[in-house]
Image (spheres, rainbow, N blue to C red):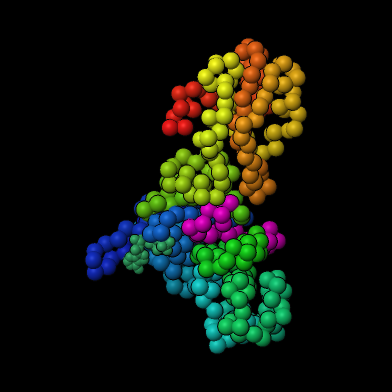
Amino acid sequence: MIKIKGLSKVYSSEEGQVVALKNVNFEIKSGDIFGIIGPSGAGKSSFIRCLNLLEEPTEGQVIVNGQDLTKLNTKELRQARKKIGMIFQGFNLLQSRTVADNVAFPLELAGVSKSDIKNKVNELLDLVGLADKANNYPAQLSGGQQQRVGVARALANEPKLLLCDEATSSLDPETTDSILDLLKDINEKLGITIVLITHEMEVIKQICDRVAVLEKGYIIEEGETIQVFTDPKHETTKRFVQSVINADIPEEFYQRSSVLESKSGKLIKVSFVGEVVKEPTFSTIIKEFDIDANILYGNIDKIQETSFGILLIELTGNNFQIKQAVNYLHEEGLQVEVVRSDESVRAIS
Ligand SMILES: Nc1ncnc2c1ncn2[C@@H]1O[C@H](COP(=O)(O)OP(=O)(O)OP(=O)(O)O)[C@@H](O)[C@H]1O
């Protein structure tokens, strides 16, 4: 649905040139919720504003539904933008207009008849749960309610794509959750593709199907959210992931193992994604291979519907049988790593 090809953005200011985006390339599939995360100054705002040409790319193409937006004239671009909604961190509502009139605004600009506007506004306010606030003014609403008005207004022209510019950054965690639920709902019910930028990994964790990590204008990592969370490659990505999940085993748990010193037995790190750990897995290896399994540490988390986790397990008994048990765990789809004593020393030191 969206193809970004060789996108660069360079700002010219009095102090010289600032390169905000450098040769960014990727695709966003129709119906996805796609998140772009990055530290401050990474180029996130520049990127999302280039997607609807609020900011003109210095180089490259932005192809939305087969149409290269950079090649359109003013009139064509205005038409194309109708199918791209946007919501903002500061909500950007018209303070002198009521909630209903804010939502009606893009429809008035599009020349829709008064009766059609009324019906559409009612339908949208219902969708965002604000039917009872139609005649209130933005200043009379909470931040979360104002963002709901922003969402309703963004959906007025029935866009295929919704851009979210740090849409939850000024909201408290509970309100953030409710706005994220609303976005997920809209994505599922209306099939709208959502592209969001954020500096909070929790937002990505809660609703994004895919994520791209932006740093200093470059995409340094991109993939399915579950894959990036469970196997982050880049240091910056690892830091973001660690801010919301405990992907590593705390050092003190290695110290609890007695097998590393005695060499009778093995210490294993088991990681998994999805429902591969069925309850009998570990009782099976104990029974089948006549060994003991002692769980020293376990952490299981969820990204949307997919669970993933990590366990530190001490296996004791006959060494040949332990090897067989490790093979069995591999065959069951678990990732098993045998911890060597020097690794554990490294982890501890
Ligand atoms: N209009 C502008 N003129 C000059 N430089 C700009 C302009 N807009 C952004 N920049 C610069 O471009 C770089 C990327 O900025 P951008 O706002 O896109 O990053 P960001 O990831 O959204 O940051 P933040 O999370 O702090 O909003 C920064 O170095 C910024 O100072």
Q: Is residue 317 above or below residue 150?
A: above
Residue placed at 59% from the left, 63% from the top? 173
Tell me how many marks there are.
Answer: 0
Quadrant in the picture for the N terminus: bottom right
* Residue 213, image x, y percentages: 46, 50
Residue placed at 58% from the left, 15% from the top? 264
Q: Is residue 202 above or below residue 324?
A: below
Depth order, front residue of 68/324:
324
155 inside magenta stretch: no
* Residue 297, image x, y percentages: 61, 35
Depth order, front residue of 330/262:
262
Quarter where residue 342 is shown: top left
197 inside magenta stretch: yes
The region drawn magenta spans 185-205
Quarter where residue 324 is shown: top right
Q: Is residue 302 above or below residue 117?
A: above
- Residue lying furthest bottom: 96
- Residue lying furthest left: 15
Q: Is residue 30 visible?
A: no
Relative side of 272 to 232, left or right? right
Depth order, front residue of 331/293:
293
* Residue 333, image x, y percentages: 65, 29
